[in-house]
Image (cartoon, helix red, strand yellow):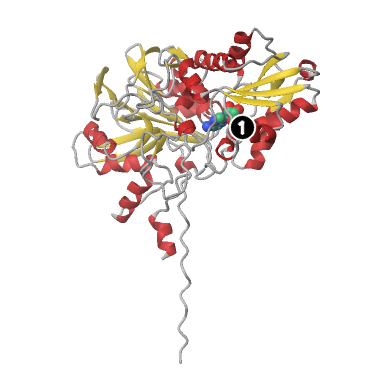
Amino acid sequence: MKKIMKMPKIKFKKFNPKIKEECAVFGISNTEDAATLTALGLHALQHRGQEGCGIVSFDGTKYHSEKRFGLVGDNFNDEKIFKNLPGKYSIGHNRYSTTGGTALRNVQPFFADTNSGGIGVAHNGNLTNAITLRNKMVKDGSIFYTTSDTETIVKLIAKSKRSKTIDKVIDALFQIQGGYALVMMTQNTLIGVRDPYGIRPLVIGKLKNSYVFTSETCALDIIGAKFIREVDNGEIVYVENDELKSIKPFPPKKIRPCVFEYIYFSRPDSILNGKTAYEYRKNFGAQLAREEELDGDLVVPVPDSGNAAALGYAEEKGMKFDLGLIRNHYVGRTFIEPSQQIRSLGVKLKLNPNVSVIKNKKIILVDDSLVRGTTSFKIVKMLYDSGAKEVHVRIASPEIKFPDFYGVDTPTKKELLAANKSIEEICKFISAKSLKFLSLNGLYVAMGFEKRNDAYPQLTDHHFTGDYPVKVIDELGGDKVTQLSLLSTASNN
Ligand code: AMP
């Protein structure tokens, strides 16, 4: 009998998007040198993402696109590249480093042709139902080119049956959920969108007759644009014929911006709700100092993330502030390195003890937050190795116990130190003499609120409370988005 050849089992690769972006967006309308101004804006927003950067411009007839890995200044730095980006409209994006999906095709802005013309999209944040939507579209025959949730938005816009682009955008927005700030460009229209809770930031600026939509005000400052206002939560703003227009298509909700913009992400000089991030951070430090009796020889910041909080702490206590750690500015943020091993190596590369300052001193070491504990673990050891007498760690935000799904790169619950250990256990783990976190209510007080409104919190603060304003549709029982795509489901069959 003829032997039947056994068909090799086709193994589909698991689609694990690891969507962890916490990026920067920038867009400018109707100006000479639009792409150059976009590059400058992205340069000011470099802290929000260092993996890749891209610019899409529109010259009145055609769209042009340049995308690169790495930093803005290393890539958008000569006449040649800007010659490839002609036109008076431009949008740009900085991408945050993720462990997966590092292909250039994942670098934004994305671009699509629709039956009412092309559209470029730059996106900051995470959708909480992107995989569910994507799976549905794949089932209906859509082909996805990238592993980014932004492509889902682009596809939804392109698929809309509405005729006007702005209506197509609204159509798409009604289907997506999560935390997002979008800057889009369709021919001669610049569009900005902020999610219904205003979780991710977006601001409006003006430069002569042009408008700018971008993640932070520091990107306006760099090009000399005037800050007009923040985009409201759930608001769509767009510029048509040099006129700023606004639509609020969603049922009204109270704004709940992400607390981490205040604690960590935003550049200290950026304005959030009327104050600079620097002022908030100093207040967090001062509030932390008010919450306890502790004396020491000096307050040392973890540079640069703990600088403002440490200053606030020292000022409040009337204690000496000194730089006990010196930072190498040519190493990126510790957190963005993909593996734990490299991450801890990164801390060593980035910081070195300033022995003359710390020897025989009782040090109060202040940082903005503690996530995995890698930074504190390394630094406390470093300070003791350099002769510090006592190291007391103070964290100017509460314990992070819950992961994020709206665009903040926090690890899974398993990796979050405070989700798994008590304060005493963490203190022991990092070998500090004592450890204290800012209280949750103290955080709200430091921001100018009387207290946290538990019925309707003023901030998106699930990192500390587990109170998620937008449900995570894509979640499959785990504590991080783990849903598989149709492809991986196929491989299981
Ligand atoms: P870890 O070393 O894991 O405890 O992380 C804490 C350090 O990472 C602090 O110095 C923070 O400034 C910084 N950090 C906190 N949140 C983030 C984030 N989402 N992305 C990158 N860095 C962060």
Counting from the top left corner in percent of width and height, residue 380 is at 71, 28
Tell me the residue at 33%/21% (across/down). Answer: 231
Which of 78 and 301 lies nearest the eye of the viewer? Answer: 301
What secondary structure is marked by label 1?
helix
Q: Nearer the viewer, residue 488 or 252?
A: 252
Q: Is residue 487 above or below residue 200?
A: below
Q: Quadrant of residue 152?
A: top left
Q: Amino acid at mark 1?
A: Ile
Q: Height in image: 135 above or below 118?
A: below
Residue at left offset 61%, top offset 32%: 423
Residue 355 visible? The answer is yes
Residue at (41% x, 59% y) in the render: 489
Q: How many marks?
A: 1
Query: Which residue occupies 18% across, 37% down?
Result: 163
What x and y, as percent, mark residue 208? 35, 11
- Asked if residue 86 shows in the view, the reply is no
- Classify 10 Å Cα crowding around label 1: few (below 14), some (14-19), many (20 and above): some
Q: In this view of the protein, which residue sits in the foreground, 86 or 353?
A: 353
Q: Which residue is mark 1?
A: 423
Q: Is residue 114 left or right of residue 303?
A: left
Tell me which corner region of the image, top left, top right, bottom left or bottom right, holds residue 30.
top left
Vertical order, 65 against 241 (above or below): below
Quarter occupied by the C terminus: bottom left
* Picture quarter with ligand 1: top right
Q: Position of residue 270 (x, y in %)?
A: 47, 16
